C-alpha cells in the first residue's frame, strides 16, 4: 500500500513547518512532536517528542498530520530606535 498523495503533501508541509505537529494514527491514537525527518521511499517519518525521545512512524500507521504547535520561526524585525 502506498501513502496517498494528500498524506505525502501534508507530510511535506509538516516537514517545512518549524513547530510541533500532531499525527493521527490508525486506531485513533495521536502523537505530538517535531517532524525532523521523512522518507517517502521508505514511507517513514521521525518525530522528536517533548521528552527528547525520537519516534519513527510508518506512513501506513498515519491517517492525518496537522500543524498544531506554534511556528517558532519569527523573522527579526528592525527596531525603530
Image: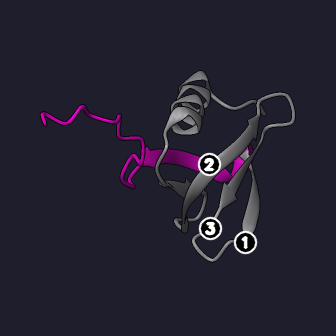
Dot 2 and dot 3 residues touching (CB under 8 Å): no
> Is residue 77 positioned above or below 25 on the image?
above
How crowded pointer 2 is (Cα within 10 Å; few <14, some 14-19, many 20+) is rated as many
Residue 66, image x, y percentages: 44, 46
Name the residue at the front extreme: 81
Classify residue 74 as left or right of residue 58: left
Kindly indicate the quadrant of the structure image that contains residue 78: top left
Q: Assess whether residue 64 is covered by the magenta stretch.
A: yes
Residue 21, image x, y percentages: 49, 52
> Is residue 48 positioned above or below 7 on the image?
below
Which of disc 3 and disc 2 is earlier in sequence? 2
Residue 27, image x, y percentages: 58, 64
Question: Helix, strand, or loop for circle 3?
Answer: loop
Which part of the image, by quadrant, shows the N terminus?
top right
Q: Image point 62% across, 48% down: which residue?
A: 35
Q: Which residues, given as a range, are shown in magenta?
A: 59-81
> Is residue 81 positioned above or below 22 on the image?
above
Name the residue at the top extreme: 5
Which of disc 2 and disc 1 is earlier in sequence? 2
Dot 3 and dot 1 residues touching (CB under 8 Å): yes
**6 or 27: nearer the viewer:** 6
Q: Image point 62% across, 67% down: which residue?
A: 49
Name the magenta segment's main secondary structure.
Answer: loop
Classify residue 56 as left or right of residue 64: right
Residue to which mark 1 is pinned: 53
Classify residue 19 as left or right of residue 5: left
Classify residue 26 as left or right of residue 44: left
Residue to which mark 2 is pinned: 35
Q: Which mark is residue 49?
A: 3
**2 or 71: nearer the viewer:** 71
Amino acid at each position: 500500500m502506498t501513502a496517498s498523495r494528500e498524506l505525502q503533501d501534508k507530510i511535506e508541509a509538516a516537514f517545512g513547518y518549524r513547530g510541533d505537529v500532531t499525527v493521527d494514527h490508525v486506531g485513533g491514537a495521536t502523537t505530538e512532536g517535531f517532524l525532523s525527518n521523512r522518507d517517502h521511499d521508505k514511507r517513514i517519518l521521525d518525530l522528536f517528542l517533548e521528552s527528547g525521545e525520537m519516534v519513527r512512524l510508518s506512513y501506513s500507521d498515519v491517517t492525518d498530520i496537522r500543524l498544531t504547535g506554534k511556528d517558532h520561526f519569527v523573522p527579526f524585525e528592525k527596531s525603530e530606535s
